Amino acid sequence: MTQTAEKHIQGLGVSEGVRIGKAFVYSPFRLSSETDMEKKTDHPEQELERLQTAKERCIAELDALIIRAQETLGEEKAAILKGQVSFLNDPSFYPPMQKLIQNDSWSAETAIHRTVNQVAGLFESMANEYMRERAADVRDVGSRLMAQLVSHQGNRLSDINEQVIIVADDLSPSDTVQLDKQLVLGFVTRIGGKTSHTAILANSLGIAAVLGIGDALDQIAHGNELVLDGSTGEVIMNPDQATIDVYLEKLQAEEAERERLLVYADRAAVTTDGFTVEIAANIGTPEEAEGLPGKGAEAVGLYRTEFLFMSQLEMPSEQTQYEAYRKTAEAMSGRPVIIRTLDIGGDKELPYLDLPEEMNPFLGYRAIRLCLDRRELLLTQLRAILRASAHGPLKIMFPMISGLEEWRQAKGMYEEARKQLTDEGVSMADKIELGIMIEIPSAALMADRFAKEVDFFSIGTNDLVQYTVAVDRMNEKVSYLYDYFHPAVIQLIKQVIDASNRHGKWTGMCGSMAGDPLAAPLLLGLGLHEWSMSPTAIQKVKQTITTLDRSACIALTGQILELDTPAEIRQALADFLNE
């Protein structure tokens, strides 16, 4: 029998790593292809019974998955599945299906199909990107309900019992909470980019991933042998033995490198001439904080609290927020945790806030602007953080600050929350450092004035680049302009760090630049104090820092500040690291 020909497929590498394994082609039910969608019935009572039975089975399946998610992934991840249960009970979702059967004699299949398309279509027509993405959630729960109705038997993620590479059109949040992370070698998807949910999940878990391979995905069959390279974006189907041998060597080298880097988990990030920086981690849930010290994180430099809000069907209460912040503080065992207040708006929206649609949401009603307008939102969060500060050293930073007025209003609300709790006799830390995110050029340009009042700065390079260079980082047509090595961005970073030094304050960075080893000589030369990054990047960045001489980095930075283009700066840094 002849060997099936080896085939190379190119996609977008979004999470590094070489993996070799069998394809697990995830085949969830497709509403549009597996049943007759325009079918009448002479027995509506039977169709109503079929629909109700499917709903009950669907809820039972979700309840089991929720318990599993709570045990293995935490409450916030389980909330995604709870949201699907709520959808099934929502008056805008399930009752219209019943009416289509009772009043128009449509089959249960048709009732589900029509209702899901109508509700999803409403979401898809919205201008806001976050709300448009909710259409996928509607179709997700609709597909789950339909699969129960017709007893669809496909490859389900919960059936995985050996190490595999998952191949799918895409993975929804409710898909990923079903995964046993020990059995997932990698992801290959038809769609998706560097900021997609699947890419973020892969990076946070250290799972290799290649996304966006398009129609080439249809050529991969369940059980096919695959080689996946998350660094280059290459997927090799049916590799021959020579190819497997090449990638086995790469895999062994990768594992040896990972093993070699483990020693840096216990080492401080100190240059060869004695300059020390703090290495911290970016997280979005309390569960992500567990085990961080063992990976080399000396602090949490960014706790993205919006994920707690986005995982709830209604505004999380003060007690719910307090529990999340307390768990995070306890998980870090006395190490600092910087909590960013709610950063919602732009590409992230909360349906229960009923936010207005905007032409330019990234420039509009978001983050601190929203929270200062809806005072109870921020006041409740600040009270929860202050209460949790009794369990560990917490710090607070406010996002999207553009001027001193916003900072002073935010600080005033912090003082109001503290006074309330003091009057109530609630225990909390005597002192909490307050800082601001530097994401807007106006804040960077006024850093000297801010430094007289704030305790620290944290530079969010992702948005700072976007606002400085006037480029939408989600728009692939202009994404080539998005580069944190742009000379203007570097000048702003320098201005912020210099201002903090002049006033005896400190500056951190929580954007992706901090986790890029190529940027390390420049950030050392600029004098960045705290570097916060994805946990998977920590050991490599520490290793890079410990090989560098800061005085040499300062000299290099002086030269870089005279260069004109991002390409020239990248080349200078690469040459320096290769010397």
Image (cartoon, grey):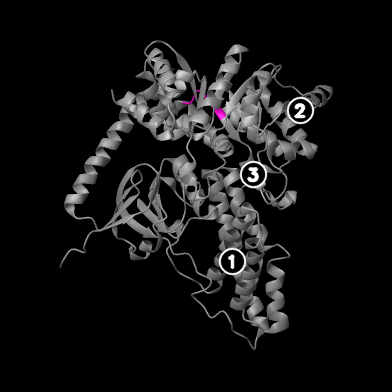
Q: Residue at x 59, y 54 (%)?
A: 81
Numbered marks: total: 3
| Residue type (three-letter) at the residue carrying disc 3 | Phe
Dominant secondary structure, magenta: strand
Residues at marks 1 and 2, CA–CA distance in whole angstroms = 47 Å
Q: Relative to residue 154, is residue 288 drawn left or right?
A: right
Residue 244 visible, this orientation: yes
Circle 2 residues within 10 Å: few <14, some 14–19, many ≥20: few
Q: Determine which of the numbered discs, if any, sits on residue 405 in the image.
A: 2
| Residue type (three-letter) at the residue carrying disc 2 | Glu
Earlier-in-chain disc, 1 versus 3: 1
| Labels 2 and 3 touching (C-beta < 8 A) | no
Dot 3 falls on a residue whose secondary structure is helix
> Residue 272's x, y, as percent?
36, 13
Earlier-in-chain disc, 2 versus 3: 3
Residues at marks 1 and 3, CA–CA distance in whole angstroms = 31 Å
| Residue matched to label 3 | 362
The residue lying toward the viewer, choosing from 577 and 323, is 577
Residue 13, compared with residue 107, is above or below; it is above
> Residue 135's x, y, as percent?
61, 61
| Residue matched to label 1 | 142
Q: Relative to residue 243, is residue 511 drawn left or right?
A: right
Magenta span? 297-301
| Residue type (three-letter) at the residue carrying disc 1 | Gly
Dot 1 falls on a residue whose secondary structure is helix
> Residue 377's x, y, as percent?
76, 39
